């Protein structure tokens, strides 16, 4: 008998989580799904895919989706590349490792309000960056109302999450037995080869996790954006979360639900693809 | 010889890169600590131009960052810790929200992670995907259903309205599943052959082995919930029950003179937790002494 | 897999049940033996009470605590022992620079209403009125009025009541103020111009000012509280050209809007417009923007302007064919469409309008008899303490029957709702335009930003 083939035990282990999960997450999720298919006014009625159609017709939704996609597609790979590099550096023995490591993780602890204050001090019309530009004799830039805004937000996002992802990679890197690298070296493999054949391969499950969490956190950057630029920011910065927040504020629950179901559906497709690859990979390993 | 020199140069360059990254990430925290020692007047002089909204008088100049205060004072700390009793009260509120979440989530998620990562059952992959999907739902969408459910359960305006959803979040389950799935099956099978039940295997073998994962879970969840704003803002009505994160979000613009000291005190427990758990994350595996 | 399907469908079922019971709370009416209850007017009337003497609970919610709400609650509960009024007033005098308190109020109120747990009476001042009405969350008050035999419309400023809500009668304001201009009547009659301020539009007004300036007498043409305030009036007057509600198209980047921005700056340079406090105090003007909030306020404003014969003029009309004076309402109350105690809530709402509460905001009350009381008190006192900078230099200002009758006429003409721009567009305008007036950005830059943001809003 294989180790894991005990479904009774599985349900026992799962039950505490499942009960709470069903009450606080699954039911709300179901309600949102339901809401996206209903009309509330004047009477409750089945609306079919009307709200989804309305969504795709909305130029603002399309703009928000495109901006979000663009933001995530650019900043998530950068974040993952940087944090993996840092994790590997920290993992190797370098000068004052512990302190460096701590300082990279620090942005995680900074309260949102301070993050926002700091970035405002930097990017305001009379802020630090413009003060510097002015000294250099260059025209000031209204950072949050220009094409730069996306870059500013990406910088905040990466700065904030670098430590987060580094912790995850570090924990996973520590799980790779040293002996593998030793064997590789004895067999005459170069560092690059060892990286491709050992590190990347063994990091795969973590990579799946990091990718998904990065995507989720890239949506959470809304909180900072909202506090800096309000509910109607510069065009480039208008993300899906702005759209959803605004539709919530105008009490359009069906539209809001439809937007989130659509978004979750798209990401779920991506994730199930990644999960399938992970399963294939696990089978290969066994 | 040459190869050794080259390696050393690379190592030096990498270290420099790391130091640069560390400085960049730590800069705002350093500034916060330094600013917490400044007088209110100095803070207003430095940051005032950028914070006072779109400038009313043009002559006020630019915001500046100063690394050395004109005059060092602990006035801010006194104002926060001694003169405003609400601050400590909210500190305690935060602790009483975050601690139960961390304990509960660690237990619940590692159990579920064991099931998802190591056991096989019907519909496992679909159920797991469902877990992941809920993580993606934005707060605005789940807020109304949650409001309804919490009020049906009579939990509105209690700490449980924050704690329970925190405990059962999918993040921990996902993280633990990833770590559990990486455990060497050979080892677990051997334990089973020796007649150990799943619970024994879970507590004696799996948990010690995923210690880095558990540490990562605690650190990341702590950061998430210590910083949460939306949930308490909506589900807690009583201002006296507010956690610190809400207070900080509120005083950010109103009491710029004390916000830095408040932030330093606010960040302290997380920094301590990091320093403590970093060893766990980094060296955890080595200490368990298990080689695959 | 079967287990999972079961689980999923179970969750969906729970969701459906929970969702529906949330949405249809209001369908179940509490019907019970009627009890005689003293109505605000003192007459006995029938109000359904809770079952078997069970207290009726009315939840009243407003953003900010007002002492008069507390006073009215105590008084009402004293008169109606079986009614409990629960006041939900989250903000009690705290400052809210970060906007967090307002955000919390808006979000929780939304969540409460959408989950069918909204308060019975809600003050709509800080909430998006159109959306609440549009989603069917507010009760039609005209229905409640017609069911209420004791309700006499004539007791109220019906001109305000009927125009307070552009989409029907879903809010009941407790108070209002009027906006207009103080002008120099002596100069006006000297000029021989026949001014019809009841109907004049911006073109006529500008012509009048130009003519007066040509004749001479004062330094500035007219004074506004701020550049943004004037811009707001102008935007309102050209609104259909700036926002096409039908096709949801904004045209703030057209020359029209940038023209307004530069015109305001030019007018300041040419001394047609004074729009900052320094100019207001030093310079004399033909017309000065004023907000009237009480009879006392009217007398004070008349004395504060340096004219021998001051007079109140209505503001130029935003649209052709409009007539009257602009007003703004405050403490706009609505009743939850899904409330189980609509009748009781309506009765309490009427009770709120029935008296001059001690800490009522200093505004005109919607109830005419309370307004009459205000005037009577002034007449009995005989004088009002003057503004130190006004013509009476801090001395007492006499209260005359004639002045109060003028005010009656002004209030009777208040039939133009001041703010009908959506809260969002208003917010965007006030957020972005100061950058132009302080010289940070050009008119084109500001217009482009506003255009983008408004268009995004319209496309949502």
Image: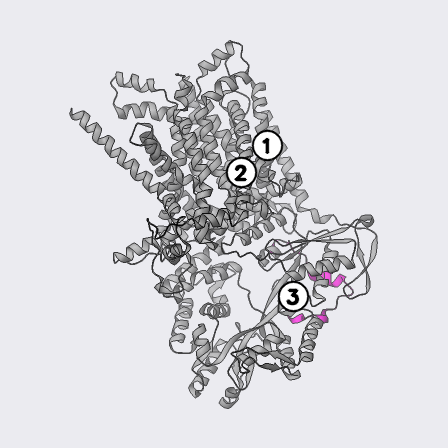
From the viewer's perspective, is the residue at label 3 or at label 1 nearer? 3
**Label 1 CA crowd tier, 10 Å (few <14, some 14–19, many 20+):** some
Report which residue position mark 3 lands on: C360
Q: Is residue A49 visible?
A: no
Identify the residue shown where x is 45% and y is 29%.
B215
Q: Which mark is residue C375?
A: none
User: x and y percent of residue C300 in the render?
Assistant: 57, 77
Q: Is residue C26 left or right of residue A215?
A: right
User: x and y percent of residue A154 in the render?
Assistant: 37, 44
From the viewer's perspective, is the residue at label 2 or at label 3 nearer? 2
**Disc 1 element:** helix
Identify the residue shown where x is 44% and y is 41%.
B267
In whole angstroms, how far apart are the C-alphas of marks 3 and 1? 48 Å
Q: Which mark is residue B95?
A: 2
**Disc 2 element:** helix
Report which residue position mark 1 lands on: A20
User: x and y percent of residue A15 in the render?
Assistant: 59, 26
Identify the residue shown where x is 63% and y is 62%.
C332
Chain for numbered disc 3: C
In whole angstroms, how far apart are the C-alphas of marks 2 and 3? 42 Å
Q: Is residue A194 left or right of residue A244?
A: left
Q: Are marks 3 and 1 on the same chain?
A: no
Image: magenta residue range = C134-161
In whole angstroms, how far apart are the C-alphas of marks 2 and 1? 22 Å
What colour scheme does the image use? one colour
Of the 4 image quadrants, the one containing the N terminus of chain B is top left
- Residue positioned most to the left: B1
Chain for numbered disc 2: B
Q: Are marks 2 and 1 on the same chain?
A: no
Chain for numbered disc 1: A
Looking at the rendered structure, the number of numbered marks drawn on it comes to: 3
Q: Is residue B158 visible?
A: yes
């Amino acid at each position: 008998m294989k180790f894991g083939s005990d479904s009774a035990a599985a349900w026992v282990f799962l039950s505490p989580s499942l009960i709470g999960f069903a009450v606080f997450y699954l039911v709300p999720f179901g309600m949102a799904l339901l809401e996206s298919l209903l009309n509330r006014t004047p009477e409750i009625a089945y609306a079919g895919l009307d709200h989804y159609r309305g969504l795709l017709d909305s130029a603002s939704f399309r703009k928000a989706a495109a901006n979000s996609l663009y933001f995530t597609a650019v900043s998530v790979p950068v974040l993952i590349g940087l944090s993996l590099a840092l994790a590997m550096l920290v993992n190797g023995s370098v000068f004052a490792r512990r302190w460096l490591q701590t300082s990279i993780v620090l942005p995680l602890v900074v309260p949102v309000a301070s993050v926002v204050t700091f970035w405002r001090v930097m990017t305001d019309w009379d802020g630090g960056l413009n003060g510097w530009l002015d000294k250099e004799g260059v025209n000031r830039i209204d950072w949050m109302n220009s094409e730069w805004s996306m870059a500013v937000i990406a910088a905040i996002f990466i700065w904030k999450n670098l430590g987060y992802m580094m912790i995850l990679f570090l924990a996973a890197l520590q799980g790779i037995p040293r002996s593998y690298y030793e064997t590789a070296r004895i067999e005459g493999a170069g560092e690059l080869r060892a990286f491709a054949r050992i590190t990347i391969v063994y990091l795969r499950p973590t990579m799946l996790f990091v990718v998904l969490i990065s995507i989720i956190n890239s949506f959470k950057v809304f909180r900072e954006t909202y506090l800096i630029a309000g509910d109607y920011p510069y065009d480039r910065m208008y993300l899906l979360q702005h759209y959803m927040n605004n539709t919530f504020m105008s009490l359009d629950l069906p539209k809001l639900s439809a937007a989130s179901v659509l978004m979750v559906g798209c990401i779920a497709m991506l994730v199930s693809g990644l999960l399938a690859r992970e399963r294939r990979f696990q089978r290969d390993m066994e | 010889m040459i190869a050794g020199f080259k390696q050393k140069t690379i190592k030096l360059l990498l270290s420099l890169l790391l130091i640069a990254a560390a400085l960049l990430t730590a800069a705002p925290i350093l500034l916060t600590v330094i600013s917490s020692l400044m007088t209110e007047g100095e803070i207003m002089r430095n940051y005032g131009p950028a914070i006072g909204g779109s400038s009313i008088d043009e002559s006020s100049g630019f915001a500046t960052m100063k690394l050395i205060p004109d005059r060092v004072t602990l006035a801010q700390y006194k104002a926060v810790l001694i003169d405003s009793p609400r601050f400590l009260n909210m500190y305690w509120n935060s602790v009483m929200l975050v601690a139960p979440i961390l304990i509960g989530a660690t237990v619940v998620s590692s159990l579920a992670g064991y099931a998802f990562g190591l056991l096989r059952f019907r519909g496992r992959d679909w159920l797991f995907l469902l877990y992941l999907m809920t993580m993606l739902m934005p707060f605005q969408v789940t807020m109304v259903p949650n409001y309804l459910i919490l009020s049906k359960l009579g939990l509105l305006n209690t700490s449980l309205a924050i704690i329970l959803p925190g405990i059962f979040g999918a993040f921990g389950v996902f993280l633990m599943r990833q770590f559990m799935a990486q455990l060497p099956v050979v080892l677990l099978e051997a334990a089973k052959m020796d007649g150990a039940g799943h619970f024994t295997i879970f507590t004696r073998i799996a948990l010690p082995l995923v210690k880095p994962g558990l540490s990562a879970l605690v650190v990341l969840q702590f950061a998430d919930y210590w910083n949460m704003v939306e949930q308490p803002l909506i589900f807690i009505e009583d201002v006296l029950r507010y956690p610190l994160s809400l207070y900080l979000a509120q005083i950010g613009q109103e009491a710029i003179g004390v916000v830095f000291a408040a932030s330093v005190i606010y960040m302290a427990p997380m920094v301590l937790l990091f320093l403590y758990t970093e060893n766990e994350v980094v060296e955890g595996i080595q200490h368990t002494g298990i080689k695959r | 897999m079967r287990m999972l399907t079961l689980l999923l469908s179970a969750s969906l079922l729970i969701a459906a049940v929970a969702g529906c019971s949330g949405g249809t709370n209001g369908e179940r009416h509490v019907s019970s033996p009627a009890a005689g209850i003293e109505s605000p007017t003192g007459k006995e009337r029938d109000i359904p009470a809770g079952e078997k003497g069970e207290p009726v609970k009315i939840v009243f919610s407003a953003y900010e605590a007002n002492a008069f709400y507390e006073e009215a609650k105590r008084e009402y509960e004293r008169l109606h022992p079986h009614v409990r009024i629960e006041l939900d007033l989250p903000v009690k005098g705290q400052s809210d620079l970060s906007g967090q308190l307002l955000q919390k109020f808006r979000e929780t109120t939304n969540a409460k209403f959408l989950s069918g747990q909204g308060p019975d009476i809600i003050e709509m001042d800080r909430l998006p009125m159109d959306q609440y009405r549009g989603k069917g969350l507010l009760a039609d008050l005209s229905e409640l009025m017609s069911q209420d035999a004791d309700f006499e419309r004539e007791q109220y400023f019906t001109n305000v009541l009927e125009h307070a809500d552009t989409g029907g009668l879903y809010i009941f304001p407790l108070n209002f103020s009027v906006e207009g201009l103080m002008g120099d009547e002596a100069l006006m009659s000297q000029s021989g111009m026949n001014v019809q301020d009841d109907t004049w539009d911006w073109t006529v007004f500008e012509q009048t000012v130009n003519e007066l300036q040509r004749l001479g007498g004062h330094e500035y043409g007219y004074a506004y509280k701020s550049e943004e305030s004037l811009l707001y009036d102008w935007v309102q007057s050209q609104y259909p050209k700036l926002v096409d509600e039908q096709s949801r198209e904004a045209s703030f980047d057209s020359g029209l809007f940038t023209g307004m921005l530069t015109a305001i700056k030019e007018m300041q340079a040419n001394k047609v417009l004074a729009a900052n406090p320094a100019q207001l105090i030093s310079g004399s003007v033909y017309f000065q923007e004023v907000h009237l909030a009480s009879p006392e306020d009217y007398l004070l404003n008349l004395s504060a302007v340096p004219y021998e014969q001051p007079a109140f003029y209505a503001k130029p009309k935003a649209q052709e064919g409009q007539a009257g004076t602009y007003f703004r309402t405050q403490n706009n109350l609505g009743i939850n469409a899904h409330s189980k105690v609509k009748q009781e809530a309506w009765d309490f709402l009427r009770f709120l309008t029935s008296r001059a509460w001690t800490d009522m905001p200093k505004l005109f009350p919607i109830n005419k008899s309370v307004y009459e009381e205000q005037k009577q008190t002034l007449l009995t006192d005989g004088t009002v303490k003057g503004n130190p900078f006004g013509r009476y230099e801090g001395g007492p200002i006499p209260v005359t029957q004639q002045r109060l009758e003028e005010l009656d006429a002004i209030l009777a003409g208040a039939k133009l709702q001041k703010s009908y721009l959506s809260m969002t567009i208003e917010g965007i305008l006030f957020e972005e335009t100061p950058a132009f007036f302080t010289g940070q950005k050009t008119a084109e830059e500001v217009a482009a930003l506003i255009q983008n943001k408004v268009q995004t809003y319209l496309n949502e």
